[in-house]
Image (cartoon, helix red, strand yellow):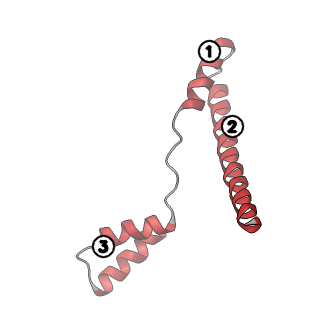
Amino acid sequence: MLKLSLVASLLALCVGTANAGLQQEKMATCNKDAATQSLKGDARKVFMSSCLKAAPASAPMTQQDKMKQCNKDATGKKGDERKAFMSTCLKK
């Protein structure tokens, strides 16, 4: 039981750390965009608020997702043609 509790705690810590990293990255991007637009005062506050609330850009495709998509796109291809297509598709 103690091991399960420890594993759950470590998992929660890892997820929290990943989310904090994403939030810091988003903050840096919003700050950079506000500086590029030379925003100051209330205009900057409004911009930063809306920027930080915006949905994050889509996450990069995982290798597993890429494999699923390439397999789907390779439907109808056989043999060397399929092999060449899959190789090229997975390298993208």
State the image quarter where residue 22 is shown: top right
Q: Which residue lies furthest to the left in this view?
A: 76
Q: Which amino acid, by three-letter code, is at mark 1?
A: Ala
State the image quarter where residue 36 is shown: top right
Contact between marks 2 and 1 (CB within 8 A): the answer is no
Residue at point 60%, 31% (across, down): 52
Q: Name the residue under label 1.
A: 43
Q: Mark 2 points at which residue?
A: 28
Q: Which amino acid, by three-letter code, is at mark 2?
A: Ala
Task: Measuring from the top left, give residue 92's x and y in whole percent.
Answer: 46, 65
Residue at point 77%, 65% (across, down): 2
Of callouts 3 and 1, which one flags the residue occurring earlier in the amino acid sequence? 1
Q: Name the residue under label 3.
A: 74
Q: Which amino acid, by three-letter code, is at mark 3?
A: Ala
Task: Measuring from the top left, give residue 81's x and y in whole percent.
Answer: 30, 81
Specify whether 42 is left or right of 73.
Answer: right
